[in-house]
Amino acid sequence: MEALFDTANISIDALNARCENTLNTAIGLSFTDIDEHNLYAELEVGTNNCQPLGHLNGGTSLAIIEILGSLAANLIIDNSIFVAVGQQVNAHHFRPALKGEKVKARAYALHTGKKSHVWEVVISNLAQKTICKGTITMAVIKKQP
């Protein structure tokens, strides 16, 4: 399988810096690694991303899917001509992640066409049990002049 990401030219520090003062910062999400086919991130469940019962908020999980899938799509297209924008995001929640617990997320491509991408994102706890799994469909469109 051909590599999607040019890992020699992608810096995790640069990706995190690019997303400072965005939703990433608000929910505490940080990118941790990238390999040829996967983009990884993590966050700790806390007051900034949980619901009143102290569980990771489902909206936070959807935000993680949106953030990772969107960034991943934009990392593999020609950004001088195109931009990838979200069209649809969906998810299934399987178990809670509790306040104080760290969760990890992994995004990988299911489809990378010329006009659309579909990325799957799996959010799991440190015991590698799936918390949430979802997909995001991205439209690849020409940049406006």
Image (cartoon, rainbow, N blue to C red):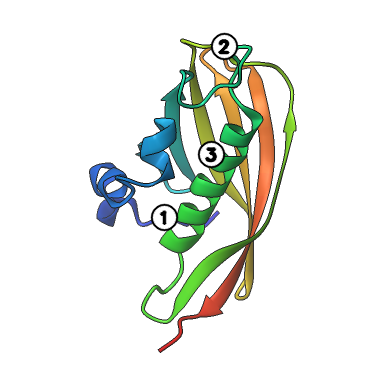
Q: Name the residue that disc number 1 marks.
A: 5
Residue 93 position, x and y percent, is: 73, 27
Along the line of sight, which residue is nearer the eye, 79 or 19?
19
The numbered mark at residue 98 is 2
Q: Amino acid at mark 1?
A: Phe
- Vertical side of 14 occupied by 101: above or below: above
Q: Nearer the viewer, mark 3 or mark 1?
A: 3
70 sits to left or right of 33: right
Q: Earlier in the sequence, mark 2 or mark 3?
A: 3
Q: Amino acid at mark 2?
A: Leu
What residue is rendered at 55% in x and 22% in y? 50
Q: Residue furthest front?
A: 52
Residue 144 position, x and y percent, is: 45, 85
- Vertical side of 38 occupied by 95: above or below: above
**How far apart are the alpha carbons under marks 2 and 3?**
16 Å
Q: Earlier in the sequence, mark 3 or mark 1?
A: 1
Q: Name the residue that disc number 3 marks.
A: 64
**How far apart are the alpha carbons under marks 1 and 2?**
32 Å
